[in-house]
Image (spheres, rainbow, N blue to C red):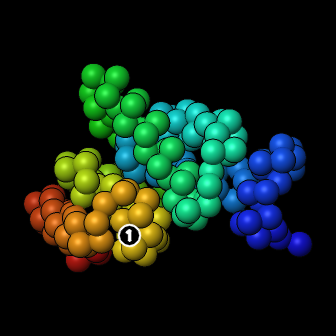
Amino acid sequence: MTKTEAELIREMKGGEPQAFNEFARRYGSRIYDVHCWLCGDATTAEDLAQETVVAVFRGIGKFRGGSSLYTWVYRIARRIAYRHMSRDVHDCVRLDEVNELEATELTERQADASILRDRIREALQALPRGQRESVVLHCLQGLSHSETAKALGRPLGTVKWQIAQGMHGLRESLKQVGGEADEL
């Protein structure tokens, strides 16, 4: 039986090891995805995701329930990502390697999808930070406008504007590199 979020939080606060395993299972890939989209580098994203999970474990007692658990976790992940990026001379704009498999092993469709993902990552990295964060949370992580605003601590109108501007910027960037903007 799957635990509710409230049960999971209560058990995590109680220090139950299984609760932390459940948390990592439920949220680990989402945490990794956020770091990957914000930083653009898979290896760095893995390290930062692990750092985020540890920070959540250490800080769960401070969670007051004023937002969803994921909103709180996202704030921690964001703080860790930007702290890392401020130390990184290249502002963490390195991109994932396309794929470790040789091109001959990829089907044409997989290669096209991989190229498109890389172009989207490049276009995301070119967006201003606020727009990038809003687009990542709303469009890629599936948060509603209000959840995105709450996670970022910004007014709803600002977040809606940032999403609209970010999506416009992504479309323009992708048009310049070959017309993939129709995909968005």
Residue in the foreground of this view, choosing between 109 and 88? 88
Is residue 51 at all visible to an observer of this figure?
Answer: yes
Position above or below: 173 against 84: below
- Is residue 163 visible in the rendered image? The answer is no
Residue 175, x across and y down, in percent: 13, 66
Q: Residues within 10 Å of mark 1 (few under 14, many from 20)?
A: some
Above-or-below relation of 11 to 91: below
Residue at left offset 41%, top offset 64%: 150
Figure quadrant of the N terminus:
bottom right
* Disc 1 element: helix
Q: Is residue 90 left or right of residue 54?
A: left
Q: Nearer the viewer, residue 152 or 33?
A: 152
Above or below 146: residue 80: above
Relative image position of residue 88 (x, y in whole percent): 33, 24
Q: Quadrant of residue 29?
A: bottom right
Q: Residue at x 74, y 57 (%)?
A: 9
Q: Which of the 4 quarters of the picture holds residue 26?
A: bottom right
In the picture, measured across the screen, residue 34 lies left or right of residue 154, that is right
Q: Nearer the viewer, residue 146 or 168?
A: 146
Disc 1 residue type (three-letter) = Cys
Q: Which residue is mark 1?
A: 139
Measuring 23% from the left and 77% from the top, which residue is drawn there?
A: 182
Image quarter where the C terminus lies is bottom left
